[in-house]
Image: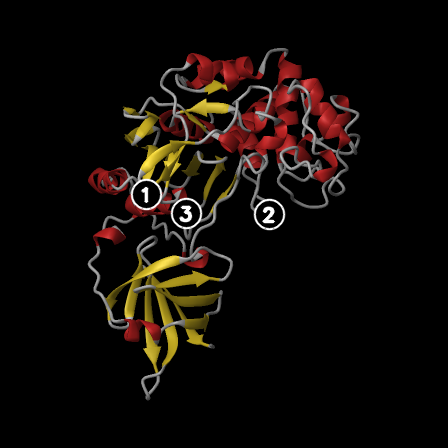
Amino acid sequence: MKTMEIARLLTWKTMVLFIVLAVMCKSVAAQDLNTSKLDELLTYLEDRNEAMGSLAISKNGKLLYARSIGYRSVNNDKKIPADRDTKYRIWSITKIFTATMILQLIEEGNLKLETTLDQFFPRIANADSITILHMLNHKSGIHDFTDPGPENSSSPDSQTQARMVDLISMFKPDFRPGERFQYSNSNFLLLGYIVEKLDEVTYSAALRNRISSRIGLSDTYYGLDALRSIENKAFTYRLQEGQWIAVNEGDFSAPVPGGAGSIVSTPSDMVKFIESLFSGRLITENSLAQMTNISEFYGLGIHLVHSQSSAGFGHGGGYLGSYSNLAYYPQDRLAIAYCTNGQVYEMDKILYHVLQICYDKSYVLPFNRPSIQLSKNILQKYAGIYETPKFLLTVTMEGNHLTAQPAGQQKSTLAAFAENGFFTQEFNIEITFGSDKTGKTDSVFIRQGDRKMAGKKIK
């Protein structure tokens, strides 16, 4: 995989439709997990070729649920199903592992958050004022090597540490260290190199010594050598005309993306890792407090997971067709990990339903909710733009149904349950339209669980 071919890889946050009305996590005992409803969700997706992947859920350190759907490999008519031991590329979730090892080195006295980058890589711009802290929380100003820009469009002839440091050293800084937040994979590639320098071993060996062997991760590996030796690994696909077609995500090599995104794992190992992280088995309570001290959405290699009443922490990642997500809710000691190697129904929506099932025993999956068909004349009168306290909502007539799209967010299909009442099949949000005395549509009411929002039609 050429360096320039991994632009946009390793995403770190996810978009959620109707974000201000997103997941309402009631503080409920999740040990009574409704596994049959989780099975219902995953079976629905698998039967319709909507997703392939694996899900794991743990609480209080105990694995409560693990299931895989779809295939890890598709070669013409030969299809090999995924199972709970199938390994996936977890991309930017690697950053939590890298940050954990950096904090361990700090605890051991081998490093400080105030240590400057020039002690390791003095040729990088502003290295004498960029600290380990700046790199952990993406405030270094170091340009992201996955987005080199037209001035640096040529790939290095190799992806060794020396050549990648040469490449990063050519970049002009995006801003002064500490000035602001800007996500950059270069930070964690370099942090991975620092782990190797201080431990005097490869990243793979450091991962094994510092994390995997300590907490018993049996299915977590690093880089190209691991993928060459692992048989039960997931290849990436996209659905085309009802068939899963292979997606070439390039050579997954150990040098790049390195400490920013080269770990391979299973959801079961992922939930074990993050539960161990938050229970004090990997770093101290003080280090964990530093890691989860959120500024501008991001802490140290970990970010805030949005919810209404139960704060969560985690990370997401992905590339051309494979995606992963890991989240932990300390208040309930609940961990959720999901990896996909093929999707039509987006990962964000799947995780929304999973979290609702975990916290709300009465939750009804929207595809099980009955709907009615309305005439085009009825539907057309609801089309327009509505102003709410949080966003502008555009309702559009498309074919025989309506769609709703908050400004800057994804479009969602609406299904009718009454002449003026609709729900989103993705997130189970109800939208009801109101009218004036003449019968002209003039308002909208949005409800998700106990949360409500009203708006007026402006166009």
Taking 292 as reference, is 397 above or below it? below
Question: Who's the residue at 72% across and 27% down the image?
Answer: 167
Q: Which residue is mark 2?
A: 296
Question: Who's the residue at 60% across and 26% down the image?
Answer: 2
Drawn side of residue 262 relative to residue 412, left or right:
right
Q: In the rendered image, is residue 286 in sight?
A: yes
All told, the count of numbered labels is 3
In what element is the residue under mark 3? loop
**Label annotation for residue 354:** 1
Taking 60 as reference, is 195 above or below it? above
The amino acid at mark 3 is Ser
Residue 196, x across and y down, in percent? 63, 16
Quarter placement of the N terminus = top right
The amino acid at mark 2 is Glu
Q: Which residue is mark 3?
A: 310
Residue 390, x across and y down, in percent? 49, 65
Residue 59, x across and y down, in percent? 33, 34
Of callouts 1 and 3, the N-terminal one = 3
**Would you call the spot at circle 3 few (<14 residues within 10 Å), some (14-19), or many (20 or more)?**
some
**Label annotation for residue 171:** none
